[in-house]
Amino acid sequence: MTDTVRGAAIKGVSRPSKRFSQDRVCSKPGCETRLSQYNKAEYCHAHAPIRFPRVRGKILDEQEA
Ligand SMILES: [Zn+2]
């Protein structure tokens, strides 16, 4: 009987190691914008992922189902 439980194989999530040193820069390749050590964001303001507020019935451009 092989009742192998594959529950401990959750190792795929490899996050970039957080290092809050004083020389943190934007994670964007080529961008050397320094980030504040108090800023937990990975990207500078120019490359930070912008989150548009989803308003119901407003933004429906990408819904072409
Ligand atoms: Zn940047």
Image (cartoon, rainbow, N blue to C red):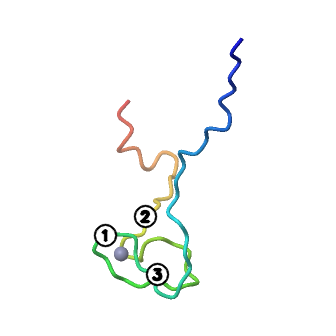
Distance from Cα at disc 2 to Cα at disc 1? 15 Å
The answer to whether marks 2 and 1 mark residues whose Cβ atoms lie closer than 8 Å is no
- Above or below for 56 versus 23: above
Q: Residue at x 45, y 50 (%)?
A: 58
> Mark 2 is on which residue type?
Pro
Distance from Cα at disc 3 to Cα at disc 1? 13 Å
Q: Residue at x 47, y 71 (%)?
A: 42
Q: Residue at x 42, y 69 (%)?
A: 48
Assign a secondary structure to mark 3.
loop
Classify mark 3 as within 8 Å of ligand 1 or not, answering yes or no.
Answer: no
Q: Position of residue 30 (x, y in %)?
A: 27, 74
| Residue tagged 1 | 29
Q: Quadrant of the C terminus?
A: top left
Q: Nearer the viewer, residue 4 or 22?
A: 4
Mark closest to the chain's N terminus, 3 or 1: 3
Q: Quadrant of the N terminus?
A: top right
Decide: few, some or many residues near mark 1? Use Cα within 10 Å; few <14, some 14-19, many ≥20: few
Q: Position of residue 16 (x, y in %)?
A: 49, 63
State which mark lies toward you, 3 or 2: 3
Which of the labelled discs sits on residue 24, or is there none? Answer: 3
> Mark 3 is on which residue type?
Arg
> Left or right of 43: which side holds 9?
right
- Above or below for 33 versus 42: below
Classify mark 2 as within 8 Å of ligand 1 or not, answering yes or no.
Answer: no
